[in-house]
Image: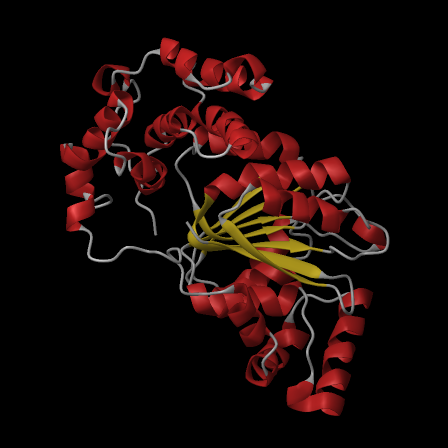
Amino acid sequence: MMCEGNKIARPLDGVLGFDHHESDDFPGKDHAHHSLVSGMQALNGYDSLHAFHCFEQCRHQFGDIANINYFMAIALIRMNRLVEAAALLQPFIALPHPQPNIKRLWDFLNHSDITHSSGCVQSESAQQTKHYFGVSLLTPTTLANIATSYELWNEILSFHKLLATDEYIEYVDNFYRQSMKRFGKYWHYMDISNVLYASSKILQPERYLEIGVRRGRSVCVVSRGCPTVDIYAFDMWAPDYAGMPNPGPDFVQSELVRHGHQGKIIFTNGDSHHTLPEFFKQNPGLIFDLITVDGDHSEQGAWDDLKMVVPHLSPGGILVFDDISHPAHPYLRQVWRKIMEMYPFLSGYEYTEKGYGVAFAIRQD
């Protein structure tokens, strides 16, 4: 888990020696993407999350370059995401002659009272373990094996009929039971339910974010795996969504209570393309151990939702994306693959053999 807090003052420029003219040192600046300019403007305007997104685009285009990572680290520090900031700087600190701006920022992270009091960042010499393979022991294939295990499916079937139902869910429940009866331990199938239940049991997440809640089936599955999880639920509550009832947040809350949920539930109502940016603007340092994107199924809408939440996924956290092989939305699989390319710290998995498909990824940095 990464640490958070509000002990870091917003105007860090004096401490860090930040000067927007340092962007002039960017290699190949004459050919840089417009996102570099946008990122610098956002950084100077203290819109840290937007700046971070812009510099990520630059990093995707140019790779690991000291000044890009430096600007990203400043944005992360302003959002109190110290561990991520240190990870971006560490490769350049190991060089024989680190750039002065990199060294200055690294010293700030490792020697300030803020850092030591929170215990978030240690100097390289003080670290007990170097994570050559990433921070998470969990691999996507391991999660897939757990999610499709005979034991886990039996657990799901013990409560699945108690979840809010409709015509589609009744069909799915019957499909589960017939498949288990016929194939037993050899049955291999994945959808959002067994992926989320396995993820929740393994991670025991502190916070879960879901875009596209509808009748609350998925949030209840997550709660079954970890009753104490705090849930952040985003939905438009469109009536008769997909031709089926969509009763709203009061119904979902009652379902969570019925399934033994003990954590907080925070509903954000409205279009995620408006509510998510505003939410993260107000909560820039908030991170989530488990995130599901199952809202807007348009190509651009799904892309925007995924791109918005990935920076708020905790190291070792799991991102779930539904319906990647739905016949009505054949482009969603390609949207997912583009996200995997854009964020190389995500290690992903896809299932498309049966049903509407599901994808998930584990953050490894």
Residue nearest the observer in this picture, 224 or 64: 64
Please, is residue 250 above or below residue 82 in the view?
below
Closest to the observer, 198 or 345:
345
From this viewpoint, is residue 295 visible? no
Q: Residue at x 23, y 14 (%)?
A: 14
User: Residue 279 location, x and y as percent?
Assistant: 51, 33
Q: From where the camera sits, is residue 33 visible? A: yes
Where residue 124 sits in the image (x, y, percent)? Answer: 20, 45
Where is residue 77 shown, x and y percent of the image?
32, 31
Q: Is residue 204 above or below residue 154?
A: above
In the image, taking residue 340 as reference, residue 284 lies left or right, namely left
Q: Residue furthest top?
A: 21
Q: Quadrant of residue 202?
A: bottom left
* Left or right: residue 340 compared with residue 16: right
| Colour scheme of the rendered structure | secondary structure
Occupied quadrant, residue 110: top left
> Is 68 placed above or below 130 here?
above
Q: Is residue 277 left or right of residue 312?
A: right
Where in the figure is residue 64, as x and y percent of width and height?
A: 44, 34
Residue at 70 percent of width and 44 percent of height: 335
Residue drawn at 53 percent across, 16 percent down: 38
Seen at 51% across and 18% down, the residue is 28
**Outermost residue to the front:** 96
